[in-house]
Structure formats: structure tokens, C-alpha cells
Amino acid sequence: MEIKPIAYFRSPLPEKFGVPRQAGLAGSLQGTVVLEPEYRAPEALRGLEDFDFIWLIWDFHLNRETASEGLTVRPPRLGGNERVGVFASRSPYRPNQLGLSSVQIASVDAAAGEIHVLGADLADGTPIYDIKPYVTYADCHSGARSGFVDGREWKPLEVRLPREFFPCFTPDNIDGLLEILAQDPRPQYQDDPERIYGLLYEGCNVKFKVADGVLTVIGVD
């Protein structure tokens, strides 16, 4: 089977570093699904405005590695050191590099072929292969077990973003940035309080340090 993108994603995050590790973790993060010209017709999105969420099937196009050389991965939820089977994880390093995300619909512009969404875990320019509506009777499984995720609590960081840096970003994107930083974008095996990290967001390089559970933004270029 040969597949090709039916849309591309637009996001303030141009690279993998900083992209939420799962959809919905940064619920205020804004993004847009832009249909390719051949699908950019109002009838393609007719009725979608009556749904609250959609599934996106997409391509881990920024990966430099695949799961072809091994069948185990190291999930961040396990500290980046313990291994589980690739099919027992949601790791981006997969045999076919396909991603699956449930994202919230903010608005639908059928005439422009655009779906504005919240909480996506996709970088800017991500190819999207399919879009499906989320339906609760089939997609929601109350009380389901979640494997190793159930036993590992994820504690968000306290984020300190000095107000002097607020004008660097559009007001609508400040909350998304704070949520991304709170999720700790660092590799989980790194914990150097003196190390300075840089996260590209909305055309800016956000520089920060992390110490004792607190992330402090120290500069924005």
C-alpha cells in the first residue's frame, strides 16, 4: 500500500525538542491541520464541526532513528533507562514511524480546508495521512489498565517565566509554552542544574535551566 499526506500540521514548535510527549498534555497549545489542495473543499470537512475531538494519523518525519535495529525502547515515563517492547509503548521509534493522536477541535474553517486544534503533540510541518472523528462509545474505555504508566507518577515542573519575556510571544501562545515547559522537555536521563537548554517556540529560542523541580527561563532570543 502506498500512502501520501492529505494534510500538513502547523505549530509554533519547529523541531522535536519541546513537543509534548503525548497529545493533551499541553491542552492550550495551538496548531492547525491544513489540508492539501486536492482535499481543500468544504465538503471534505462537512459535519466535523459537530465533534469535539479528532484522531490524527501522521508521520514521525523528524526521526533519525527507527525501531528496525531493535524491538525495545526506553519510555520517558520510566526515566529513560528501563526498556519495554516497542509494541508495549507509544515511542516515536517504530517500524513504520506512524503516529496516532487525539486532539481537541477549536474551530473548523471548511472553506479554507483548515482545522484549528488544541493539545497536539506534532511538530510544525508534520505530514498527516488521515483524520477521523473521535466517538466516545467506541474510543473511550473507562477503567482500562495502562501498564507501566499506572505505576509511575509524572510530576510537572514549576515554571518561572519572567514577565519581561511575555512580549516575545503572542498572548494566545503563552499558556501553551508554559504547559510545554512544565512537562519537562529534557531527556529524562539528564539532570544537570547548570546546563542551559534551548527550546524553539514561535520563532524564538527559549533558554532555561532546571533545578529542584523548578524550570526557570533565563533568556529569549
Image (cartoon, rainbow, N blue to C red):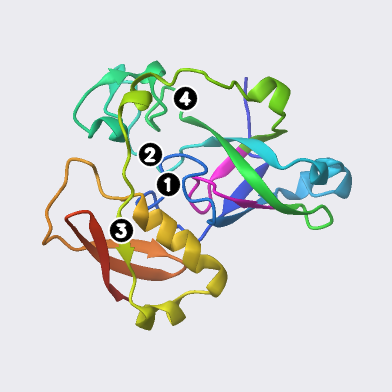
Chain-order first, disc 4 or disc 2: 2
Q: What's under tag 3, amino acid-wise?
A: Glu
Q: What's under tag 2, amino acid-wise?
A: Asn
Cα separation, mark 3 vs mark 1, equals: 16 Å
Residue under circle 3?
158
In-front residue for pair 98/148: 148
Q: Is residue 93 left or right of residue 190?
A: right
Q: What's under tag 4, amino acid-wise?
A: Asn
Cα separation, mark 2 vs mark 1, equals: 15 Å
Is disc 4 placed on a helix, strand or loop? Answer: loop
Residue under circle 4?
96
Is residue 111 rendered magenta in the image?
Answer: no
Residue under circle 2?
63
Q: What's under tag 1, amino acid-wise?
A: Pro
Circle 2 or circle 3, nearest the eye = 3
Chain-order first, disc 3 or disc 4: 4
Q: Are marks 4 and 2 in contact (CB under 8 Å)?
A: no
> Residue 70 placed where, x, y %?
28, 18
Asked if residue 107 is positioned above or below residue 2 in the image, the reply reads: below
